[in-house]
Amino acid sequence: MAARHEQIADELRDGINRGQFPAGSRLPSESELAARYGVARGTVRQAVAALGAEGLIGSRQGARRVVIGSGARQSFEELRSFAQWARAEGRRPTGHVISTARRPATAEDVLRLQLPPGTEVLYVLRVRSLDGAPVLVERTVYADWIAEAVEHIEPDCESVTQRLYDDVGLVFAYGEHVLDAVAAGTRDAGLLDIRRGSPLLRIQRVTTTRDGRPVEWSDDRYRSGTVAFSVRNASGTNPLTRRLGPG
Amino acid sequence: MAARHEQIADELRDGINRGQFPAGSRLPSESELAARYGVARGTVRQAVAALGAEGLIGSRQGARRVVIGSGARQSFEELRSFAQWARAEGRRPTGHVISTARRPATAEDVLRLQLPPGTEVLYVLRVRSLDGAPVLVERTVYADWIAEAVEHIEPDCESVTQRLYDDVGLVFAYGEHVLDAVAAGTRDAGLLDIRRGSPLLRIQRVTTTRDGRPVEWSDDRYRSGTVAFSVRNASGTNPLTRRLGPG
DNA sequence: CAGTGGTCTAGACCACGTC
DNA sequence: ACGTGGTCTAGACCACTGC
């Protein structure tokens, strides 16, 4: 049983995310909300304070609270799966495997996946799209012990994360994400339908099981303007979220 | 004239920093503090809530509040200030103001900085370098109430953050960072000594005071290969850190 | 000027911890 | 059992906004 002020905060947050309170619009006054929910003004204040701490609304004395962003934010848990995030945004995610290969682990693979030298790993090159438009090139290296399960997944599988959970009960936790910008190479450009040299947001990440065992590491390159990542520094909120770009 | 709950928060914060309430010790109860300061319990709760948001104290229902530590928020301190981070890495940071201008706030400024429409804001264009090589173009908008203090800072001041703290006691507390990749425009290219169209890592950020009042927002563009950002998902560790690139 | 948010009070009940 | 923090109420006054 959640506290009343939390229920109210949830309802208001939903209202903001659903567009009932668009960015730039004004929230109802505290008194009005108090009457609507049948609570005292103090309880409403607890609720809106939470939204303020999350950065969703701003306030100035004497003026009604203003909605800052309708930023549909996903938790860090959902960050791991492109498909799950996209569906939550109301977009249609698709995926397509370009090539796969089994090779002996490179020095980098050994380091990142904490494998014995010489282990065979599985490389997969994937392109992922939103509503049919290519958005992301993924170059993933899977550890040997999960490689076979990955190879049994059909090439157009929408959510590999979901499939690995369904098939072998694997639950991903998260290691580390390193973000920088790179220019699209010839291959990237062809796959994403952009010009060579176009800016890409690159995220190099390691995914682990909950107990810290590395499962995969990946070099993901996002087409500029399609997706942005946001990090917030307020206490108690999720540190990193994915965002849709203006495209 | 600061609010009573802020005065109380300040006194308690000082007490923690001075060792009067060492890490691990318990804070006096809300009722005791209320009696000591001659205020209602609600006012004390406002004060301790601020300390909780800063990560100084923790609380569990039924038990007294526990002092966590004096100043463990190093990660964000470093993230916020380019100069402080660079020095910690053993690099030599420099900064140079290209241009400044006072203009009426745009709609975007009004929204991000929570200002009344028509307020005059201060735009500053800066280039920052590591060991003499340009690395970062910063386009910052300062709220009107801090603009004057910023204008009094010399153009090649190494750390604006430090100066604002020294001059007017301004402490930055919370922020949000949105990361994506963009192509360098003509201006960016000239300032960073790269070709037009080169990939840049863009970080748009809002910085606020401890109580959530926005101070500045900025569009920072990092030259590719110089700096990367990393996010880790272990609890209790720093969510976002800056990294040197291979350059 | 009326309305709004910021602040503060003085109570109350409950769930949880410590003893 | 008792103290504590978490929640909630029903008032109040003030500073500021918006008209």
Image (cartoon, coloured by chain):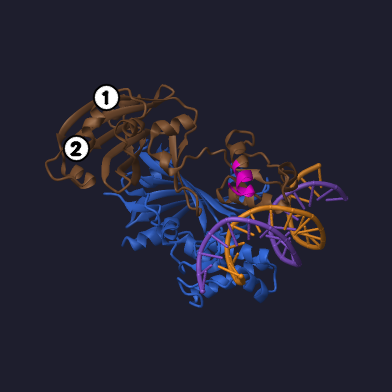
Chain colours: A brown, B blue, C purple, D orange
Q: Which of the 4 quarters of the picture holds residue B92?
A: bottom left
Q: Which of the 4 quarters of the picture holds residue B190?
A: top left
> What SS does tag 1 mark?
strand
Q: Position of residue A56 (x, y in %)?
A: 58, 45
- Camera-nearest residue between A3 and B20: A3
Give the numbered dot on residue A98: 1
Q: Give the distance between the C-alpha atoms of the residues marked 2 and 1, in whole angstroms.
A: 20 Å
- Camera-nearest residue between A214 and B222: A214
Callouts 2 and 1 on one subunit: yes
Q: Residue at x 29, y 23 (%)?
A: A155
How many discs appear?
A: 2
Residue B159 appearing in the image: yes
Q: Residue at x 39, y 33 (%)?
A: A82
Q: Kindly report which numbered mark, 2 or 1, lies closer to the viewer in this rendering.
A: 2
Q: Chain of mark 2?
A: A
Amino acid identity at mark 2: Asp
Q: Chain of mark 1?
A: A
- Camera-nearest residue between A84 and B26: B26
Pointer 2: what residue?
Answer: A144
Q: Position of residue A34 (x, y in %)?
A: 73, 46
Q: Residue furthest left?
A: A118
Q: Is residue A142 above or below residue B193?
A: above
Q: Which residues are magenta?
A: A1-10
Q: Is residue B140 above or below residue A26?
A: below
User: Magenta segment, principal secondary structure?
Assistant: helix
How crowded pointer 1 is (Cα within 10 Å; few <14, some 14-19, many 20+) is rated as some
Which label's residue is closer to the chain start, 2 or 1? Answer: 1
Amino acid identity at mark 1: Ile
Residue B2 appearing in the image: no
Q: Residue at x 57, y 66 (%)?
A: B168
Q: Position of residue A4 (x, y in %)?
A: 64, 48
Q: Position of residue A87 (x, y in %)?
A: 46, 29
